[in-house]
Amino acid sequence: MRVTLIDKPFYARVHDLWRYARFAMAREYVARDPRTGRPLNVSTRKRKRKGAKIESGPWMAIPHQAVIPLATGELDTQRVTWKEKYHYLEQIDGIKALSILSGALAHQGHQVLLDCLMDESPEIRSAALFALPVVAETCPDELFDHLSVLLDDKDGSVRTSASECLKRVAAIFPSATEITLSNELRHAVRSRRDAAFSGLGELCLTWPEVACDHLDELLQEENLELRRNAAALLRKVLSKGGAASWDLIGWALDDEDVETRRRAAKCLVPLAHKEYRIATILAERAILDRDSKVMLSAIKCIETLDTDHGRARELVLAGCSHKHANVRLACVKILPRLMGDEILRNHCDALLREEKDPRVIKELREMSIDLQIQGTEEQKNRFLAPAPAVPQIDREVAESQGHTVGMEELEPPKKKDTSSRHG
């Protein structure tokens, strides 16, 4: 059954409670690796609900009993002391102060806020949007319906305030703002899209599973900017997004737009620290990309992986013969981690026969030289072992027989006889 606009606030609250309970129960169980017994990226800490940030100002010093009269206009001004200074506050400040109310006053303030959201004055509507995120934590009824309407307000300042309000509430009320946020992410006005993407960035940290749904849809859009912005947010959902985030990175790496692939490839290194097997699979795909920046991101990922065994070692060896010089240079620098000295020198000699790039040639030559034999005198001396120490008893026996142990002391230079020169 389709949810109507009137029923949506109640449905949104129930859906949020159901979602929170489902994930809270899932965290009771900790999956462990059968070989090591260590947890598999599952935290036992419960997620803390993120509250709206409150911007401080003189209106916070208004007495609670005076907030509603000042917000409704019954009280013209209210004098307060804020940071050791006197301030005379008016109706706009009273509307902002609706966010500091609690208990029964908060419910009365909610009704006042609804009236302010429909007021004829743009300044009053903007002030009401300022207080909306905090008031919604106590009484969300109908507030998000008004927010979706004010995003298309006839006044530009109100539309800006509504975009800022959506950016603040998207991470706190993901279900109530899901459709509104989805529409704003695709809006024709750039400032509104930017505000919506800022809110989506915060949503990636608080509700990554919901953010993954938005990113999934954005990565399928024909608009290049939407796909690029979505790919730039993949790193934020990586830590808590789970398998859904891995799929999103894989899809973005297959995108036809090179910038989208570059932004997705930047997720490979942090992914290698969490899921090295998934990172190996994605790096194997990215290293075959036709763009050099995507390849280099894949190589950086491989450097993070365990190159002693498996597919990562094969990728490095194959990359040493890649058609792009930057890729060959990056792979050559990893070779000392894969091979012993003698095998490394032989492999470098073989690569030098076909290498044309001067940077790669210089790196290979440095690795192919046996410093113990072909190095300078100083480099050869580094491989010389010091003479073993003479035992103390042998030293005493030798000295008793008039012999010296170790380096012989040089005789002090003789002084020249200058007496005959001066007569």
Image (tube, rainbow, N blue to C red):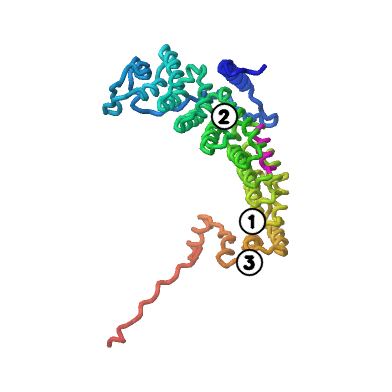
Q: Residues within 10 Å of mark 2 (few under 14, many from 20)?
A: many
Q: Which element carries disc 2, helix, strand or loop?
A: helix
Q: Residues within 10 Å of mark 1 (few under 14, many from 20)?
A: some
Q: Say if 353 sits above or below 188 in the image.
A: below
Q: For the residues marked 2 and 1, what is the alpha-carbon distance in whole angstroms?
A: 41 Å
Based on the picture, tell me whether residue 250 belongs to the magenta stretch: yes
User: Which quadrant holds residue 364?
Assistant: bottom right
Marking on residue 326:
1
Confirm whether residue 157 shows in the render: yes
408 sits left or right of 420 in the view: right
First in sequence: mark 2 vs mark 1: 2
Q: Which element carries disc 3, helix, strand or loop?
A: helix
Residue position marked by numbered label 2 in the rendering: 181
Q: Which element carries disc 1, helix, strand or loop?
A: helix
First in sequence: mark 3 vs mark 1: 1
Which region shows up in magenta? 244-255
133 sits left or right of 300 in the view: left
Q: Nearer the viewer, residue 406 or 49?
A: 49
Based on the picture, tell me whether residue 419 belongs to the magenta stretch: no
Q: Nearer the viewer, residue 282 or 362?
A: 282
Q: Residue at x 61, y 43 (%)?
A: 263
Residue position marked by numbered label 3 in the rendering: 374
Q: Where residue 417 sits: x, y (%)?
A: 34, 81
Q: Quadrant of the N terminus?
A: top right
Confirm whether residue 38 shows in the render: no
317 sits left or right of 174 in the view: right
